[in-house]
Amino acid sequence: MLNEVLFYILSALILVSALVLISARRPIDAALSFIVTLVSIAALFALQGSSFLFATQIIIYAGAILALILFIIMFLNIQDKNLPDEPHKKRDITFSTLAVLPFTVVLISLINKSPLVDQALPYDLFGGIKDIGSVIFNDYLLVFELISILLLVSLIGAVSLAKEDKDVK
Amino acid sequence: MLSNYLTLSVILFSIGIIGVLSRKNIIVIYMSIELLLNAVNISLVAISNTLQSNEGQVIVLMIIAIAAAEAALFMALFVVLFRNKRSLDADIFNLLGEKNAS
């Protein structure tokens, strides 16, 4: 019972802050409401007992990625005149909502037809670091190594993209 | 119930698509793409907890790592684009498009 109430509170937080994100005019407002979304999603993971993913979501998303976004927004020193004019923002949002709505309705009705959905979630401590680690290092070792290479490539790519090109200028 | 989690995930995914489709500010578009990834994460974690299988959570970990790699590249792109055009408008960055298309 308590779990259900917590779930509804958290999903209301997630949806409201996501709506604020996509309608905010200044990027700093969008980033601050994105923090609320990410922390609420992390709390949703904790509610299901996925303790390791809870910690990862807080550390990597709400910590590292959001700090990077906020740092870049402040580093670029974005003034109001740098922001794009969006005179038809309300119209655009309405039309894209109409475009996405059929997809949402069909998917939700498909979800409710699935035989799996009536199961209650166990809500016990599950998915700790030991369980996940044993699955990664036994079955998914190759994926793990490939992702480390991907991170290295993106690090090098980011540095070489952002560095000032002295020869051209 | 699992259906609550999956419905929340679908609605969040739709909000992310609406953000990508309707906004022009590239930083807001980037954060909407992150919303899509997070919506998928919610459904994967709920399904993996229901089935008592850890593989879904491993996929979520991989998605979070890829999102971190993506974030670094996006930030470098923002710096380069803003340095060259002094704007965040997605419609200005049309160097690869046709000349007369607005």
Image (spheres, coloured by chain):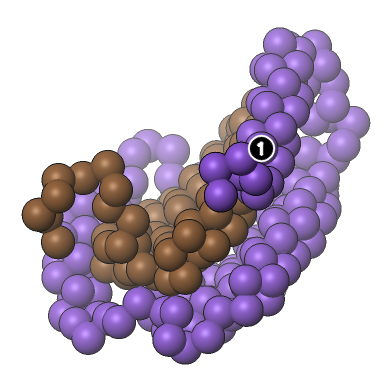
Chain colours: A purple, B brown
Whether residue A27 is visible here, answered yes or no, is yes
At 80% from the left and 11% from the top, the residue drawn is A138
Q: Nearer the viewer, residue A117 or A14?
A: A14
Q: Amino acid at mark 1?
A: Ser
Whether residue A47 is visible here, answered yes or no, is no
Residue B42, percent across and down?
56, 51
Name the side, left or right, on which A31 lies relative to A136: left
Query: In the rendered image, which quarter contains the C terminus of chain B?
Result: bottom left
At 81% from the left and 55% from the top, the residue drawn is A59
| Residue at the far left in the pictured view | B100
Q: Nearer the viewer, residue A36 or A104?
A: A36
For numbered disc 1, what is the local secondary structure? helix
Q: Nearer the viewer, residue A166 or B99?
A: A166
Q: Nearer the viewer, residue A11 or B16?
A: B16
Q: Is residue B92 above or below residue A137?
A: below
Q: Is residue A36 above or below residue A56?
A: below
At 53% from the left and 85% from the top, the residue drawn is A79
Q: Which residue is mark 1?
A: A160
Residue B89, percent across and down?
36, 68
Q: How many marks?
A: 1
Residue B40, percent across and down?
49, 46
